[in-house]
Image (cartoon, rainbow, N blue to C red):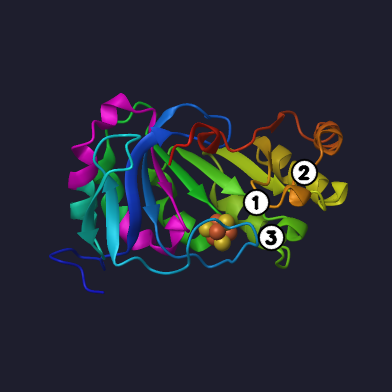
């Protein structure tokens, strides 16, 4: 993919839209989302298609699910112009999400300067495994919202070392740590996430998995037990489900 007049390659973007932040401690805040295609992981609960979309869809009016479609890939300038026409000042933050946005650090380095104007700046949502990519853009980001990937939830190997390096690269930033939990999640995995969050002086969010199979969702007593145990090692532990889905929003 060659950039159209840009110093960096154009990249595939799934969608650009304005909605509420549906996860984490800023739930309910109005965010402008740029959802990048592609990811280096493959979590069992992932709700993002792995196929690279031929078009980026841009919602024309928030909440209507009416879109214009722009051919992928897009340059930083193209994304920047689109977003600046969507009233960033009326938003709490511009959220870079995915997929995994840190697959494209060079692109982000050129894009983020176009995205100024949101009240609290740039909110990066990431799987917390690409520390070198984070180091390239961390100065441009205001909040790093990082997943800790628990192996029983993802069905993958643990990423403890990658997460530790990532948190080291995020030092000095406001950090939020989120862990998706399922009915199978053992307390040991949550305690490991809580230790990391505490070291990083971050809020830990336990997010019950949003699964079609109700059998995967943690039971209420299990969630409250995991929260209590995590509070033994971390100062601020919150249980927050995905809220945008309850409202039928993107
Ligand atoms: S890190 Fe996120 S985007 Fe990537 S596979 Fe896991 S849930 Fe999906």
Task: Report whether the residue tagged 3 is closer than 8 Å to ligand 1.
Answer: yes
Residue occupied by mark 2: 195
78 falls in the magenta region: no
Q: Picture coordinates of residue 23 (x, y %)?
A: 55, 37
Quarter of the N terminus within the rendering:
bottom left
Residue at left 25%, top 66%? 8
For the residues labelled 2 and 1, the Cα–Cα distance comes to 30 Å
Secondary element at tag 2? helix
Q: Quadrant of residue 119?
A: top left
| Residue 154 numbered tag | 3
For the residues labelled 3 and 1, the Cα–Cα distance comes to 15 Å
What range is drawn magenta here?
81-108
Residue occupied by mark 1: 212
For the residues labelled 3 and 2, the Cα–Cα distance comes to 19 Å
* Residue 130 visible in the current orientation: no
Indicate whether 51 appears above or below 68.
below
First in sequence, mark 3 or 1: give its number: 3
| Residue 114 numbered tag | none
103 falls in the magenta region: yes
Secondary element at tag 1? loop
Q: Quadrant of ligand 1?
A: bottom right
């Amino acid at each position: 993919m060659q950039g159209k007049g840009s110093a960096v390659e154009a990249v595939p973007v799934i969608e650009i839209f304005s909605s509420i932040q549906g996860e984490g401690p800023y739930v309910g805040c109005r965010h402008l989302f740029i959802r990048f295609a592609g990811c280096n992981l493959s979590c069992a609960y992932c709700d993002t298609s792995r196929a690279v979309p031929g078009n980026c869809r841009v919602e024309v009016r928030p909440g209507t699910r009416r879109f214009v479609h722009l051919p992928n890939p897009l340059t930083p300038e193209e994304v920047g112009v689109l977003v600046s026409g969507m009233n960033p000042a009326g938003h709490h933050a511009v959220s870079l999400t995915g997929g995994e946005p840190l697959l494209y650090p060079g692109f982000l380095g050129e894009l983020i300067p176009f995205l100024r104007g949101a009240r609290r700046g740039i909110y990066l949502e990431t799987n917390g495994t690409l520390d070198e990519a984070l180091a390239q853009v961390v100065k441009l980001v205001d909040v790093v919202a990082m997943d800790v990937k628990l192996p029983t939830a993802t069905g993958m190997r643990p990423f403890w070392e990658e997460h530790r390096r990532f948190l080291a690269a995020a030092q000095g930033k406001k950090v939020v740590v989120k862990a998706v939990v399922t009915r199978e999640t053992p307390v040991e995995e949550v305690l490991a996430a809580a230790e990391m969050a505490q070291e990083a002086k971050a809020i830990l969010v336990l997010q019950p998995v949003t699964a079609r199979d109700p059998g995967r969702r943690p039971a209420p007593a299990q969630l409250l037990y995991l929260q209590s145990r995590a509070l033994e090692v971390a100062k601020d532990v919150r249980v927050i489900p995905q809220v945008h889905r309850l409202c039928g929003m993107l």
